Image (cartoon, rainbow, N blue to C red):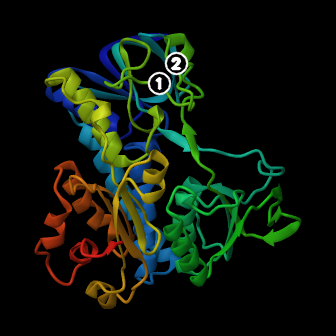
Amino acid sequence: METKSYKNVIIGFGKAGRALAKSLSQHGEEALIIERDEAMYGGTCPNVGCAPSKTLIVAGHKNLSFTDAMKTKYKVREMLHNGAYHGAADEPLVSVLNGLAHFVDAHTVEVAGTDGNVTRVDGERIFINTGATPVIPEIDGIYNSKNVITSEGAMELAELPERLVIIGAGYIGLEFAGMFRTFGSKITILEPHETFLPREDDDVSAAIFKDLVEAGVDIHLGAKIEHIDDNFVQANGEKIPADKILIATGRKPNIDELELQNAGVELATTGYIKVDDDLKTTAENIWALGDVRGGGQFYYLSTDDFRIVNNQLFGDKSRKLSDRTIVPHSVFITPTLSRVGLDEKEAQAKGISYRLFKMAAAPIVKTKVVQDMRGMLKALVDPETDEILGATLYHEDSHEVINLVSLAMKMHTPYQILRDQIFTHPTMGEGLNDLFQNEVK
């Protein structure tokens, strides 16, 4: 067995890992990236996640056929995939080893290569960046059906399914529901819970539910899924026909083959890798970055994980995971749902006082321009400081506008600044002028 030694070993070619490898090389340190799947250089987002899925969503809105949309998606993915690979691998002190890694001890991993060879790798520091993978629930027949797919499989379909059944009404399921509905698929969502989007305010979830139904999406709440076959899903005694069955019931850390116990790396109660404020694991020389460490599974959080570790290695050690208190996120349904900070449901549960500002999206001129007047805007403001506690935006381009609110919160800016700001016209951003004049008494 061949043995190699490196100062830095990165398991997984995700965003945080490749950015770290590049930085290490630029600081004169060698780094080895181990990746089990050559198709996943760059991680989930550029290959099977946000970038390809959003490319398809945009293509649907442009009325491209599903075939042409998939061709566009493959072009985008190839550009991002190649850019991710060369952005790290072309660095003079970065090496790439393809294969499946498992820990022997806290400083040693063995890598089973695709060529059948096993390489032992010793590392002074080891960084785990293996991401997350879809959860497959225990449903009768799910492993036998030839038409069951995950979100990753949905990105590889050769033809549009005429009838798509989606199990799970979470954010991923809803994004795919809207996308495939735009291309013309008949969509049925089966959600085991009785409440639709329980983490959102009731008025927001009700508006989204209404808009999806009016767009032709059939949503079954409280669905007891009894059996999955090749061409149907049986739920509550009813057989629902399906050409494809998309499982969208959450994700779990991609750690099954790592044998973390050999390295003394412990898991949190969530099942993800336990980390401290510096993203160190319970093994002194091992860090975990990206989705595998739990929390929000967003590309930009993986980027920030890199910043934290990079700052610990080469900076003033000031960046901490606990500093990450204001994080916006968006769900790319149509229109887009975006949030940052507290909503009413959370503020009430925590006993936090707030002033509520709320309005429909329809009065904003840009909604007439794009011919989509659906949605609403909500914001919570601290009654003593006038700082924004949080916002929920459900409207066209909310994924852009939410960054303005997030920045204002980060800078502790009073809401009046956004209320009186001069925005370009016609844009959705100028809706913030009106929102912060519409206090609900």
Quadrant of residue 308 in the image? top left
The quadrant in which the C terminus is found is bottom left
Residue kind at label 1, given as amino acid type: Lys
Q: Which disc number belongs to residue 274?
A: 1
Which residue in the rendered view is the most extreme toward the left? 422
- Name the residue that disc number 2 marks: 266
- In which quarter of the view is residue 391 placed? bottom left
| Residue drawn 52% across the image and 18% down it | 266
Camera-side residue of 230 and 167: 167
Residue 303 vs 222, above or below: the answer is above
Picture residue at 44% right of the left edge, 47% below the top: 351
| Residues at marks 1 and 2, CA–CA distance in whole angstroms | 6 Å
The reply to whether the C-beta atoms of the residues labelled 1 and 2 are less than 8 Å apart is yes
Residue 2, disc: none
Left/right of residue 369 with respect to residue 329 in the rendered view = left
Q: Please determine whether, in this image, residue 205 is positioned above or below residue 302.
A: below
Residue 426, picture quadrant: bottom left
Front one among 118 and 290: 290
Residue at left 36%, top 80%?
361
The image shows residue 350 at horizontal and vertical percentages of: 45, 45
Residue 92 visible to an observer of this rendering: no
The amino acid sitting under disc 2 is Glu
Is residue 235 depicted above or below 285 in this figure? below
Residue at (71%, 46%) from the top-left corner? 137
